[in-house]
Amino acid sequence: MVESRWRIRDTEPRAWERLAREAPCSPLVARVLAARGIADPEEARRFLHPKLGHLHDPDGLPDMGRAVERIALALERREPIAIFGDYDVDGISSTCLLFDFFRFIGCRVKYRLPNRLLDGYGLRADAVRELAAEGVKLIITVDNGSSAGEEVDLARVLGVDVVITDHHQPPAVLPQAPAHVTPCVPASSYPFRSLAGVGVTFKLIWALAQRLSRATKVSEEMRRFLVESLALVALGTISDVVPLVGENRVLAKFGLMALSETARPGLRRLVESALEGRGEARVGGEARVDSGAVGYHLGPRINAAGRLGRAETAMDLLLASEDAQAQALARTLEGENRRRQAIERDIFESARDRVLRTVDLDRARAIVLESEGWHTGVIGIVAARIAQEFSRPTVLISLEGGRARGSARSVPGVHICDALAACSEYLSGFGGHEMAAGVELEPRLIESLRRALNDAISLEPSEMVPEVVVDSELRLRDLSLEAVKELELLEPHGHGNREPLLLVEGAAVAGRPRVLGGDGRHLAFHVRQDGPAFRAIAFQQAQWASRLERPGARASLLVTPRISRWQGRSEVELNVREIRVG
């Protein structure tokens, strides 16, 4: 692992004092908010205390009115409707959400999910032909469709309208669809452009609910349905790693509450699996599901189905109405997730070994590796892990049947899609964004791609040092149980709203560190600064034990303060991300 560079966020001098006074909030919370650019007390209040009333009206999304009218017309005419989704968590939860809405209003619809390994991403011509042959007159895409110009044209020729709902950046020329609902079209004036696909889908069913209720304020029964549906919205939003700020923060906050209390058998089984995966158990039948449970336990179980081939298994689970069915499907997904983990582990170990043996990291600006049989549904995850460990843009390519298909992941400072564009003469196709992309090419051109990509990236290897952004310095004497409890108001955490990270400089190590865990990889120790000692836990960092136990040892730590709750007692504990002993 490359040693990171620590950077403390620039903050207006004393800006946090106004927040602490007028928001109001603790100085610790105020420092974190100010470091993250929240300087206005009203903005701080909305951030710390989000409300459903903070959501924007769905009619503000481009083409929402047209989409609602076309769907309402299909309902009035009793036209056959199909939903076309995607195979990841965002696409599956979006599909389930819209399917559930139609089921709630008594309308039967079909749905289709592409096979990741056979079909790839997005609406396909063969799916359009199949649905048209089945009599479908309206296809509604969720979490895809913005790039499906040819498929939309084909649908129109076959007498099928396509209403697109999406959140991906659209191409310069938009598909000629009756409605294209996305916050990302250039002409959009929608105030929040970072919704996940499931967030856009939620806005669609909200607008449809208003249309069917013939009022801005929907019926109480419909309102309950919308609030309970936020469980699916949180699942897709958090798993798709969109920034958890603005509307996404509201949707995730209330969605996690709905997820914790869900009565849906399938979601309930997923929640139980997540708690079991973290070594937790329900207390009195209640479970608090946070963004970590979604990101590390619920989401991967659903994703496993799509990554290994059949996303419909996850849909069946989410739509299950009987406990026995949900339990059986949850076991199936659990098995698929274990299989995905084993495949990922094998590929990672193989790729990591290849990097250590064959890549000159002092000179290489990019890592490009290929192998027969690497699973295309998993190599994107592995590419991200390799890029993180070695701090290099990474492309992993699977060779199969004379084809070469790969996934690319980048590091800060390198726009991987721009770099691939400079190598386009060696690629059959590519697409993605700044930090991730997919590629296809002829196997014989892989070495040419490797050389061209290294030439296309201008950032020197010595400059590819991972940077850890720190919210603020911290004196341990400023920690109190009440202040750390108030930090929980910053949840849910995720992309764009990471857990608070604070720098403790020159803390004295008190007592002898202890190595923890059955495999001896974790570390517990105590530190102090002119006051009481605090317990610190450093996961995966047992290698520091010998240096921390030296007499007079002092350490600088990057920490997240948390509340440790055990047998009715609560105390402040430091979760240590990085250690430097000086």
Image (tube, rainbow, N blue to C red):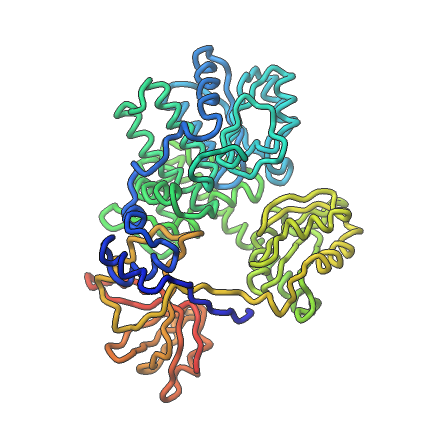
Tell me: 149 left or right of 217.
Answer: right
Q: Quadrant of the C terminus?
A: bottom left
**Of residues 328 and 204, the one drawn nearer to the viewer in this rendering:** 204
**Residue 565 rendering spot, x and y as whole percentages:** 25, 61
Residue at the extreme right of the image, as rendered: 444
Q: How many marks?
A: 0
Please name the residue shown 59% across and 60% down the image.
Answer: 387
Q: Position of residue 338 (x, y in %)?
A: 50, 51
Where residue 323 appears, as percent x and y from the top left, is 35, 36
Residue at the spot x=37%, y=36% of the render?
324
Is 567 left, or right, of 188 in this rendering? left
Q: Is residue 39 above or below residue 472?
A: above
Answer above or below: position of 125 versus 518.
Answer: above
Query: What is the x, y in percent for residue 435?
Result: 57, 52
Look at the image and tell me whether residue 317 can be seen. no
Q: Looking at the image, which is closer to me, 117 or 358?
A: 358
